[in-house]
Amino acid sequence: MTTTRTQPRNRRLRTAAVALAGAAGLVLSITPASAAPGFDFSTRISGPDRYETAVAASKLLYPNAGSATDVVIVNGTATVDGLTASYLSGLKAAPILYTTTNNLPAVSQAELQRLGAKQIWVVGGENVVSARQVQAWRDAGMTVNRLAGPDRYATAAAVALVEDQFAPERVFIASGTSTADALTVGPIAWAKNYPILLTEAGSVPAATQAALDKLQSTNRTVVGGTGRVSDATYASLKATQRIAGNSRQETAALVAEEAVAKENFDPNSIALVGGSDGAAIDALSAAPISGSKGVPLLFTADEATLGTVTTQYLQAQAPRLSGKGWVFGGPNAVAPAAVDAAKAAAQ
């Protein structure tokens, strides 16, 4: 007899999670209209590196000391294991902090202490977060849960199956080798309890297939084009939708449109993250903020350039933009020139 999984109810931040129902249609052509007077991108969540940017996001999520029960820890450089951590962070209403393999950076350690966390959720095996770190947290009186498998696909499956009492309404599936696609759906995964699984381009890993079977969801969305997830793999996954553009910027714009049109994200606000390989990881620590506030997430083309697709998206959405523009990452990730270009496009 199969047990029906039911949606968890205890989501402490859900009252702030998603705002207004969106309108349909991503239109990447210029619409002659303007954002509300004063709309800009003056809210920057950042630090001098990804570790401090994650801490800045954590402080925004939990401004009061001693107020977080759970914290998610991922490796800040071996990021592939952490691609699906946004879902776990949403389930536990937890911030995401970064560590190195052997040592928790001082800024992350200070934030862990400020939060007063009782439970730590480590995503990845001992090769990315060492057993010595885990033991130190346990010695400090914290409960540590490690979610890991022999590879990135099994680790993603372990994260997806961490709560076994509900069948998610939707599952995202993205490439396990191209990190940006999984990051684009992080805010939706956080807000809506949608797991993110990873796949190879030409075949479905056994761990991914097993997780799909256990999750029981028939609403399966592939994120990324055929170069990342082939049509044959799409069919093997029994996917029901593909969200894909010709670049990570266009895929992010299409995901943003999906978030507004179908997942009740706020059409009046928008967030920017650096779209380069080095800066895109800020999207992971941004996911709890973007997800809790229902703010769609866009990628710049690189550190200094907004990019044509993101520019056109902001121009098309300008009539709706009456809320707040967010930037995640410091000037080395999203340069002032890119922020100025985003403000100009929104006007």
Image (spheres, rainbow, N blue to C red):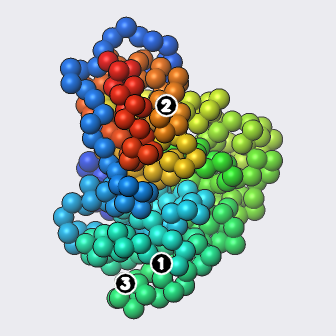
Q: What amino acid is found at the position of numbered circle 3 in the picture?
A: Met
Which element is circle 2 on? Answer: loop
Q: Are marks 3 and 1 in contact (CB under 8 Å)?
A: no
Q: Earlier in the sequence, mark 2 or mark 3?
A: 3
**Residue 182: percent from the left, percent from the top?**
57, 48
Label 1, on which residue?
Answer: 103
Please indicate whether residue 218 sits to the left or right of residue 346 in the image: right
Q: What amino acid is found at the position of numbered circle 1 in the picture?
A: Asn
Which element is circle 1 on? Answer: loop
Q: In this view of the protein, which residue sits in the foreground, 231 or 178?
A: 178
Identity of the residue drawn at 47% across and 20% down: 312
Residue 130 position (above or below residue 244): below
Label 2, on which residue?
Answer: 305
Identity of the residue drawn at 67% across and 53% down: 176
Identity of the residue drawn at 37% across and 8% down: 32
Q: Are marks 2 and 3 in contact (CB under 8 Å)?
A: no
**Residue 5: percent from the left, percent from the top?**
50, 61
**Residue 263: percent from the left, percent from the top?**
42, 38
Mark 1 and mark 2: Cα distance apart in space: 34 Å
- Residue 83 in view, yes or no: yes
Few, some or many C-alpha atoms within 10 Å of disc 2 (few <14, some 14-19, many ≥20)?
many
